[in-house]
Amino acid sequence: MTVRKVWIGATAAVAAAVGFVMVLVAGVYIVAGTMLGGLGGVGKALAEGAVPAAYQTLVQKWGNLCPALNPALLAAQLYQESGFNPRAKSPAKAEGIAQFIPGTWATHGIDGDGDGDRDVWDPNDAIPSAASYDCELASYVQDVPGDRTKNMLAAYNAGAYAVIKYGGVPPYKETRNYVRIITTLEDSFAAPVNRVDPSKQAAGAIYFAQKKLGTPYLWGGNGTPDQDGRFDCSGLTKAAYDSVGIDLPRVANDQYNAGPHPRREELLPGDLVFFSDDLTDSRAIRHVGIYVGGGYMIDAPRPGAVIRFDPIDTPDWFGATRVTEDGAKALPTTV
């Protein structure tokens, strides 16, 4: 939510840039609609930086343990369970990065790193245990009708017996939401193999942000009247997409998971662009802007600055997200 660089040009230059951007947006979307229509989709290898570097190899390896699982799905599951926090503990006493309850861990925890113990707080044990347990559950429910991956996830949340009893994902609200969230978020953890379809709401988000050019930055700013309409970086991006009916999370590192990740050369206006001091870990992201084309974004950079155009090609460039409505709906929206 912080820190960008320098003011780009004077007021006259900004006014000229706004006109340029609007022409660019229209042109890019015409071209994109032609070039990308019918394409899209992502692969199952992990997107760069989507998983903290300490866990990347573990998730990639153990995510291929069985046909019902893949690395991007396992990453989405860990994100949903704990936000990759190895010290997470829930009110229900679920523990660790994979949120095992003690009884389940006692039965299904494995010594993933071969050091002679099974430690629920150690991701080197907990991540392999989550994958192993997923695949074990998949084998339990393999004869149940329906999608094997969804049945596996439902069994992780509600138990294999419930899936067998109901002949598929059971009619529990919590379990159905769990399955929907993880299968939706899977795309945001997967490395793209084709170009990613442009967002239909992107131009509207840019239009909102353009109207805020010159507004002073406010740490924690959401643009409310009591804040004199001021924003910080993720407050601006959230408000911009709120204006077109997409509810993003409040903080930048959660906004990163609101959709798939186009490559730098595939950026289109409206993509969210992210910056970090740790280029291997999306949880360390500290700044976000809205790409407008031509190598520039609109962002709320830092205290003492105003909402402005800034270049994106800086040493702290992390990556980008093409916001999707389904991806945003799957994410937490509270701090």
Image (cartoon, rainbow, N blue to C red):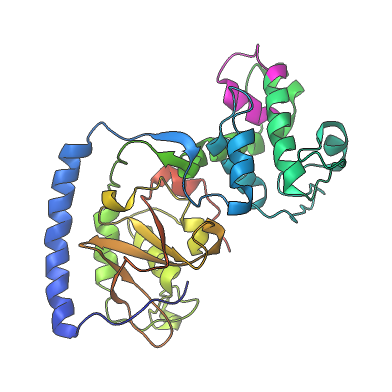
| Rendered residue at 34%/49% (across/down) | 263
Apparent side of residue 105 relative to residue 288 in the rendered image (left or right): right
The location of residue 107, given as percent across then percent down, is 86, 31
The location of residue 232, given as percent across then percent down, is 43, 75
Question: Is residue 130 shown in magenta?
Answer: no
The location of residue 101, given as percent across then percent down, is 82, 42
Question: Is residue 146 shown in magenta?
Answer: yes
Q: Is residue 216 above or below residue 236?
A: below
Query: In the rendered structure, which segment of residues is drawn in magenta?
Result: 139-155
Which residue appears farthest toward the front when viewing the image?
A: 115
Q: Is residue 258 above or below residue 317?
A: above
Apparent side of residue 121 relative to residue 46 in the rendered image (left or right): right
| Rendered residue at 58%/22% (across/down) | 67
Figure quadrant of residue 182? top right
| Rendered residue at 35%/47% (across/down) | 262
Q: Please indicate, yes or no, whether residue 250 appears anywhere in the rendered image.
A: no
Q: Is residue 289 above or below residue 185?
A: below
